[in-house]
Amino acid sequence: MNKTITYFDKLKVAFHYLLPQFLVTRAAGWLAEKQWGAVTHTIIRLFIKKYRINMQEAVYADAKDYVSFNQFFIRPLRDGVRPINQDPNGLCLPADGRVSQLGMIEEDRLIQAKGHYFNLTDLLAGDFELSEQFKNGQFITTYLSPRDYHRVHMPCAGTLRQMVYVPGELYSVNPFLAEHIPHLFSRNERVICVFDTEFGPMVQILVGATITASISTIWAGVINPPRPGEIQTWHYPAQGEDGAIYLEKGQEMGAFRLGSTVINLFAENQVEFAPYLHQDTAVRVGELLARRAQ
């Protein structure tokens, strides 16, 4: 039975529709880059306390080690705290967070939340040729909360073939709004990364959100800002060609400045998700995501 939306819920949704998303996001990005010494360190300590962040996992455990909030937010972790699954037929989880949804792509539809679907071709910025490769395939959506580690890693080794920046809205991607804002992920700003892998084509999408001040990749640096207001596409050489960008399984590939969502797409009959994964499962980088389909 569907949960009845309350008057308070309706007000929360209305607030997010009316929120000046880009103004708030620019302000958050500006503040997060400021180097205010003791003030910055106090803000970081309060954030650590509020979200109960385990700083013993970080390379730098003291708030004083970070000159800005953004530097703290994308803090690197110590070696070994996120071991990468070594099964040669296995893929690993790309991010810390919780599984928002996972399952089969039903022709051109992915489930966003109970009773809400969004369109694969829309998610892929209208690229019909690319979307055809993933119809009836598999997808998983991972939500990163403010307390999570915000660097994103590779589920498997792959060669980057294409990156697409898609302008869009900046709605929050928290679970509540995913249940109440239609087509949220295909409406929000995002960076689509397409890889050739031994498990077939794979797409890893970094979805922007309110106060997600920027998205970066290790090969291109910060993608946004600026926000040019139009789709931008970059193409890259195939494996073995000069200039090819090849990333290992478990290698860092990008980061969010403040929280958001990662969506992974796999082609039909290529992978089978690990049976322990369900909606709302807490996950960490490197844990088993899927195995090669039999």
Image (tube, rainbow, N blue to C red):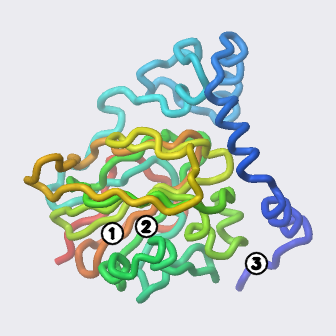
Q: Residues within 10 Å of mark 3 (few under 14, many from 20)?
A: few
Position of residue 236 in the picture relative to residue 104 (left or right): left
Q: Amino acid at mark 3?
A: Lys
Mark 2 and mark 3 in contact (Cβ < 8 Å)? no
Instruction: Identify which amino acid the numbered label 1 is placed on.
Output: Phe
The kind of secondary structure element at disc 3 is: loop
Relative to 34, residue 107 above or below: below
Is 179 or 229 nearer to us in this picture?
229
Q: Could you say which quadrant of the image residue 57 lies in?
A: top left
**Dot 2: few (<14), some (14–19), or many (≥20) neighbours within 10 Å?**
many
Amino acid type at image mark 2: Ile
Q: Secondary structure at mark 2?
A: strand
Residue shown at 35% from the left, 33% from the top = 81
Give the mark nearer the N terminus: 1 vs 3: 3
Residue denoted by label 1: 273
Residue found at the very far right of the displayed protein: 7
For the point 51% across and 25% down, the residue is: 55
Residue 19 coordinates in the image, percent (x, y): 81, 55
Residue at image mark 3: 3
Label 1's element? strand
Position above or below: 253 against 118: above
Pointer 2 residue: 140
Q: Given contact means CB atoms under 8 Å apart, are the residues at marks 2 and 1 in contact?
A: yes
Pointer 3 or 2: first along the chain: 3
* Residue 262 at least partly seen: no
**Disc 3 or disc 2, which is closer to the eye?**
2
